[in-house]
Amino acid sequence: MNGMAGNVCHAAGQPSYEVRELHDGDPPIDLGVRYRCDDFLDASDFVLDYLEENDPLREGLVSALEIVRIDGERREIVTTYRFRDTVVRHPDLVAQWGFPVATWRGPAEHRPRRP
């Protein structure tokens, strides 16, 4: 994106993309631009690489990232990664189904008989 080719591309009306890091609080704090490019897939690849390098175990060291599409004066958040949205919450299966689904072997009449 740097140099004359990038400027010509944007002058022709091509969008660019920024990857911004946020501290996901209330309100969120913008920690700044981490990457700029002319292609959404490049921005997406950068997000994955950035997470792998800075928070490989997804422990929340990177609180949030967003990809922003810039088209002239218009800015649009295209996608957002938030650590708090990736935390797996396991449902209480016993409360939901009324029996231990993960360990239940089925009714006795359907179990294979042992010789």
Image (cartoon, rainbow, N blue to C red):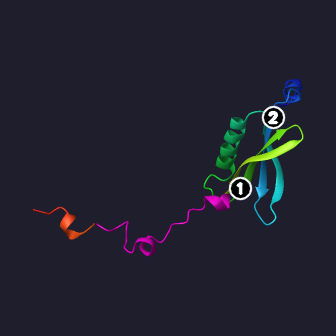
Q: Amino acid at mark 1?
A: Val
- Expressed as whole percent of the image width and height from the top left, the position of residue 35 reads 78, 41
Which residue is disc 2 drawn over?
Answer: 15
Crowding near pointer 2: few (<14 within 10 Å), some, many (20+)? some
Q: Quadrant of residue 19?
A: top right
**Label located before the other in sequence (1 or 2):** 2
Q: Residue at x 67, y 49 (%)?
A: 51
Crowding near pointer 1: few (<14 within 10 Å), some, many (20+)? some
Which residue is disc 1 drawn over?
Answer: 62
- Expressed as whole percent of the image width and height from the top left, the position of residue 1 reads 82, 31
Secondary structure mostly seen in magenta is: loop
Is residue 104 shown left or right of residue 78? left
Q: Residue at x 18, y 67 (%)?
A: 109
What residue span does the magenta drawing correspond to? 83-105
- Expressed as whole percent of the image width and height from the top left, the position of residue 62 reads 71, 56
Q: How many marks?
A: 2
Disc sitting over residue 86 in the figure:
none
